[in-house]
Image (tube, rainbow, N blue to C red):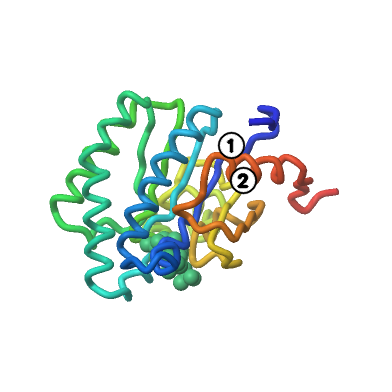
Amino acid sequence: MAVDKEKLPVHIGFIMDGNGRWAVKRGLPRKMGHREGAKAFRKIARYCKTIGIKYITFYAFSTENWKRPKDEVDEIMRLFGEYLNEADDFKKDKTRIIFLGDKSAFSEDLRTRMEEIERDSAVFDEMTMLLAMNYGGRDEIVRAAKTAAEMVLEKDIKPSDINESLISSLLYTGGIPDADLIIRPSGEKRISNFLTWQSAYSELYFTDVLWPDFTAKELDKALEDYASRSRRFGGV
Ligand code: IPE
Ligand code: IPE
Ligand code: MG
């Protein structure tokens, strides 16, 4: 990795897109693409750890992805369950894991396991991995607004206390710095409801490579591009 440490993003978000097209291109069922995508996810997460990225978020399943055919959704959930079963690896990787999204849609088994992993990995602070599962950026903001409204009703705060930092703290990502860099493979150039609030000043990187083909080398390219950008946050 050629980029100097100071110019690395603190928080990278990955929109893991292109699994379906990867499979279709090979005459395979779409679910094979999700299997390959899951392998790429493991490799990229490990690579981010070795180069010293502090926060990584993977967009794995959106609130809109339930529209897909049942067998495809079932396969994604199966792969997710498989990952959760081996997630004890976080202990050897010293990685904190946090799930972003509405857990109530998952089976009791998956939910319990997700909560266990969040609790048991909370001791680690070298790297934090955020997995966006049944996540929607708009849904996240609506929830934060509801919580703020309840706080007003309970007289914990006044309406005038509602500000950016309060809303930020009520998001699934409360306490986590905003994404510096968002990477979307697959050729699509949109955000698709990912980190809606947290991407206000993110640098965006798009590539035609499909997610299952996304390698450490591709990530290096994105990091080099990121390192060359001038972030102004509205200043000069
Ligand atoms: C991303 O790959 C994975 C999920 C959305 C779960 P896709 O399945 O969207 O792949 P394409 O966009 O159809 O190629
Ligand atoms: C975004 O990809 C969601 C995830 C990668 C989990 P989609 O494939 O769902 O996005 P659209 O439909 O192309 O916008
Ligand atoms: Mg897609």
Image vertical order of residue 50 relative to residue 128, above or below: above
- Count all numbered tags in the image, as a single digit: 2
Label 2 secondary element: loop
Judged from this view, the residue extending furthest toward the left is 109
Viewer-proximal residue among 167 and 37 = 37
**Residue appearing at x 44%, y 67% in the figure:** 25
Q: Is residue 150 left or right of residue 14?
A: left
Badge 1, how many Cα within 10 Å: few under 14, some, many 20+?
some
Q: Which residue is mark 1?
A: 10
**Residue appearing at x 14%, y 54% in the figure:** 108
Q: Amino acid at mark 1?
A: Val
Judged from this view, the residue extending furthest toward the front is 27
Under 8 Å from ligand 2: the CB of mark 2?
A: no
Label 1 secondary element: loop
Image coords of residue 141 (percent x, y): 46, 62
For marks 2 and 1, give the CA distance.
7 Å
Q: Amino acid at mark 2?
A: Asp
Q: Quadrant of the N terminus?
A: top right
Judged from this view, the residue extending furthest toward the right is 236
**Residue appearing at x 74%, y 50% in the figure:** 233
Viewer-proximal residue among 186 and 120 = 186
Q: Which residue is mark 2?
A: 180
Q: Is residue 142 visible?
A: no
Image coords of residue 194 (percent x, y): 49, 60
Q: Is residue 111 left or right of residue 1?
A: left
Image coords of residue 68 (percent x, y): 32, 74
Q: Is residue 135 visible?
A: yes
Q: Can you tell which quarter of the image residue 4 is in?
A: top right
Q: Earlier in the sequence, mark 2 or mark 1?
A: 1
Viewer-proximal residue among 110 and 49 = 49
Image vertical order of residue 78 relative to residue 42, above or below: below
- Mark 2 in CB contact with mark 1 (< 8 angstroms): yes
